[in-house]
Amino acid sequence: MRKLFCIAVMALLALSSCSSDKRPEVFIEESQMIDILTDAYLLEARLNLMKSAGGDVSERQVDFYNQLFEHYGITDTIFEENMNYYTHHPSILERMMDSVNNRFIKANN
């Protein structure tokens, strides 16, 4: 779960230079964003396993994220714009991160 928090913090830092508080033109609803963040967490876990096994993940990481975005019919720009929106609404982002965390807790029970 710490990794998921780190992803959210990195997104916040990367996007903090953008000051728009408006909804993006292509808006990802909260429920779908939870799905995307859940899959991103699983993707990061897979990359970490590959890295710990001695694999070079730098090129694979881009491919995996492109596949993730393609699966959801979005681009990296759409994802970034939506993360920017949600980081400007921390109570919503916190609720989404709690939902992602709860999914993994339920999966481990």
Image (cartoon, rainbow, N blue to C red):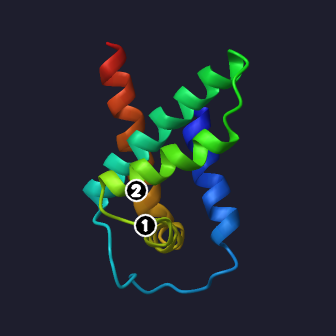
Amino acid at circle 1: Thr
Q: Residues within 10 Å of mark 1 (few under 14, many from 20)?
A: some
Q: Residue at x 59, y 43 (%)?
A: 61
Q: Residues within 10 Å of mark 2 (few under 14, many from 20)?
A: some
Amino acid at circle 2: Phe
96 and 44: which one is in front? 44
Identify whether 68 is placed above or below 22: above
The reply to whether dot 2 and dot 1 touch (C-beta < 8 Å) is yes
Question: Which element carries disc 1, helix, strand or loop?
Answer: loop
Residue 78 image point, x, y percent:
43, 72
Residue underneath mark 2: 69
Mark linked to residue 75: 1
Taking the image as shown, residue 60 lies to the left or right of residue 104, namely: right
Mark linked to residue 90: none
> Which one is earlier in the sequence, the residue at label 2 or at label 1?
2
Taking the image as shown, residue 27 lies to the left or right of residue 1, namely: left
